[in-house]
Image (spheres, rainbow, N blue to C red):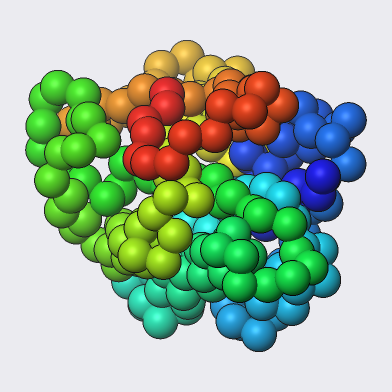
Amino acid sequence: MTVLVFGSTGQVASALKMTLADQGAVFLDRGACDLGSPAAVQAALERYQPRFIINAAAYTAVDRAEEEPELAYAINAVAPRIMAEYVASVSSGGRLNPPPSSLIHISTDFVFNGTRTTPYRPGDPTDPLGAYGASKLAGELNILDAAPERSMIIRTAWVYHEEGGNFVKTMLRLMGERNELGVVNDQRGSPTYAASIADAITTIIQQDLFTPGIYHWT
């Protein structure tokens, strides 16, 4: 069974390298597969013919996405559609050789506008405020359009890990440098350890718990 992970150096992908160590998973960084290139994504899928696809890669520069909306859309919306079309194609019996395939896609709380004071549920109306959130929502909709029965969308928030930059590491660093900290107080969220996301995904794969739909994990 081949598990193909798009992403290699990101926080969730780094955690998946530990939990999927015994699964023989293949991790593709940008050098191995540029998600901004539809041809590169398609070629990777055809080469590895995975039983599971985990899309742990994304254009995540929220502010810069306003200046590069086309690139954000290509990575966050077009590439997931290609993955979903692949799993739909090989799982429909339309191909002779590749095994049936399923997609697990990591999404974000940025598909919402953030104005609620209670936790969001998977079925709540979406309303992204910027290019990043809009591109991630477009990716979700593309997946649900192309392969709703073969895809799990897992939305998460405020991810932190030993690898990469994140709020938790920033706070730890600043606490070692300053006697007093000033932090914005107009945001609420659930800091989510990347290893917990990786554990959940690995459990889904190993225990045959794949169930299509949209889920929230924090």
Q: Which image quadrant is residue 89 in? A: bottom right
Q: How many marks?
A: 0
- Position of 114 with respect to 23 (left or right) is left
Find residue 39 and report its horizontal and vertical position in percent. Answer: 66, 85
Q: Residue at x 55, y 46 (%)?
A: 104
Above or below, 154 against 74 in this view is: above
Q: Residue at x 13, y 46 (%)?
A: 125
Q: Residue at x 71, y 26 (%)?
A: 206
Find residue 193 and report its horizontal and vertical position in percent. Answer: 56, 24
Residue situated in front as seen by the camera: 130 or 26: 26
Find residue 152 and report its horizontal and vertical position in percent. Answer: 46, 43
Q: Which image quadrant is residue 94 in? A: bottom right
Residue situated in front as seen by the camera: 173 or 92: 92
Of all residues, the one furthest to the top in this rendering is 179
Residue 53 appears in view: no
Locate the N terminus and report the quarter of the image it occupies.
top right
- Position of 192 with respect to 102 (left or right) is left
Q: Residue at x 41, y 66 (%)?
A: 146
Residue situated in front as seen by the camera: 94 or 65: 94
Locate the C terminus and report the quarter of the image it occupies.
top left
- Position of 160 with respect to 125 (left or right) is right
Above or below, 29 against 34 in this view is: above
Residue situated in front as seen by the camera: 17 or 64: 17
- Position of 51 with respect to 197 (left or right) is right
Above or below, 182 against 44 in this view is: above
Find residue 38 and report its horizontal and vertical position in percent. Answer: 59, 81
Residue 103 appears in view: yes
